[in-house]
Image: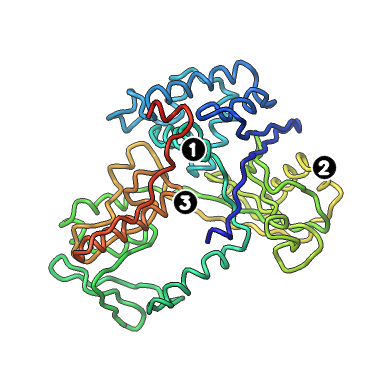
Amino acid sequence: MEDKIRFFDRLLLVDPQGRRGALHGGFLPAPLHLSGSFLTFAPLSTKDKVAIARAMFAIIRARGEPRELRGNPKMSMLEWLQSRRQTQRGIERFWRVVLVSALSEELERIDARYGVTVFWKSVLKTRKGYLMGVPVVELGLLYELCGKSIEEKGGEVQFRLPVRSLRFDNNELKAAVFDGGREEGGEAFILALPHSSVDELLPEQVKRDNPGLAGIGEIKDAPITGVHLWFDRAVMKEPFLALLDATTQWIFNKTALYGTKNGAGENKGQYLQLVISASYSLLQKPRQEIVDLCLAEVRRVLPAAVEAKLLKATVIKEPAATFSPQPGVDGLRPMQQTTVKRMFLAGDWTDTGWPATMEGAVRSGYLAAEAVLRAAGTPKTILQPDLPADGLMRLLV
């Protein structure tokens, strides 16, 4: 899939006053590679930057594991930031922008260890960690070759075939049951499902007999809302923008990312996708109210959109888009290899060592595959290592 992902090394942010700031790497080694653009970042004051730098130094000094977070699963990221005397504007225009987008949750609901990990691994430890990968094809095309790869290896991919139940015998998963009572057996079953679906499929007796599965039902969800806008003309030049102090968090220029087409196969106009993570406040709002709110914010930061005609708009709410990385959630996350024979789990909500991120989801797949091979007596390492420390960080780590 590598040729279908484009990586960007420049993150452009805009505040309601139209002031723009860009974060990008310079010539200095990690962890100083972003310092040049950070020092000139217009939406933050000198006081904000000094406080942020102080907190970053604390993360570096602790090698990503501040002492106050060790063995303390109840501290939220907001509480940690306040304990580090961060300014309110620094929290809203820096920490929140990065973490709500990365973890799909508000700062008061994020385990502080997860928040610190994001900055340690993506901002401080290496020059490449902050790069942003964006698909340059529609998601259906991004996944299409995965199914073909399975089929080329003799596998079978079936769609629109919901699992209705699982059949167990003596703490062993025997079969998955589909519509009409059809059963499929197997040497191994990987349940790559949302945690709520797994919880519904597991009989109460199985959960009682396997304590590691008992907490799955207590994991909470976090919502993401996507707003899709089609204009009659080009209104945005950049591939993407992050908005500060707004409901809309990211605007992706799908026309530019997909090429010359607007995402619907037409060569005129422009297609923008807006992403709003932790969108609790939007779940009960009607579609038109959300469109009006987001359109006003788009026109505030993109002057060309004021005169443009909105041709079409779509709102997609995902109430259970990711699991919520709340303080203490690690105690509820199961391993990929369960104590039920032949049953394995995959998903960002399993115990991956990472929070609710796409990287965490991929890690769960690697770990599930390793678990299957290990149970089959053919162990193999598949998990890809984290990006190595570079620059000055190699001397510390």
- Count of picture labels: 3
Up-down relation of residue 176 to residue 114 (above or below): below
Q: Position of residue 129 (x, y in %)?
A: 50, 40
**Residue, disc 1:** 122
Front-most of residues 143 and 198: 143
Categorize mark 3 by other alpha carbons within 10 Å: few (<14), some (14-19), many (20+). some
| Quadrant of residue 132 within the rendered picture | top right
Q: Position of residue 264 (x, y in %)?
A: 71, 67
What amino acid is found at the position of numbered circle 1 in the picture?
Ser
- Residue 303 marker: 2
Categorize mark 1 by other alpha carbons within 10 Å: few (<14), some (14-19), many (20+). some
Q: Residue at x 77, y 67 (%)?
A: 266
Categorize mark 2 by other alpha carbons within 10 Å: few (<14), some (14-19), many (20+). few
Q: Secondary structure at mark 1?
A: helix
CA distance separating discs 3 and 2: 33 Å
Please name the colour scheme applied to the rendered image.
rainbow
What amino acid is found at the position of numbered circle 2 in the picture?
Pro
In terms of sequence position, does the residue under pointer 2 or pointer 1 come before the other?
1
**Residue, disc 3:** 358
What amino acid is found at the position of numbered circle 3 in the picture?
Met
Q: Residue furthest right?
A: 307
Front-most of residues 191 and 332: 191
CA distance separating discs 3 and 1: 13 Å
Label 3 or label 1, whichever lies nearer to me, is 1
Front-most of residues 65 and 206: 65
Q: Is residue 271 left or right of residue 136?
A: right
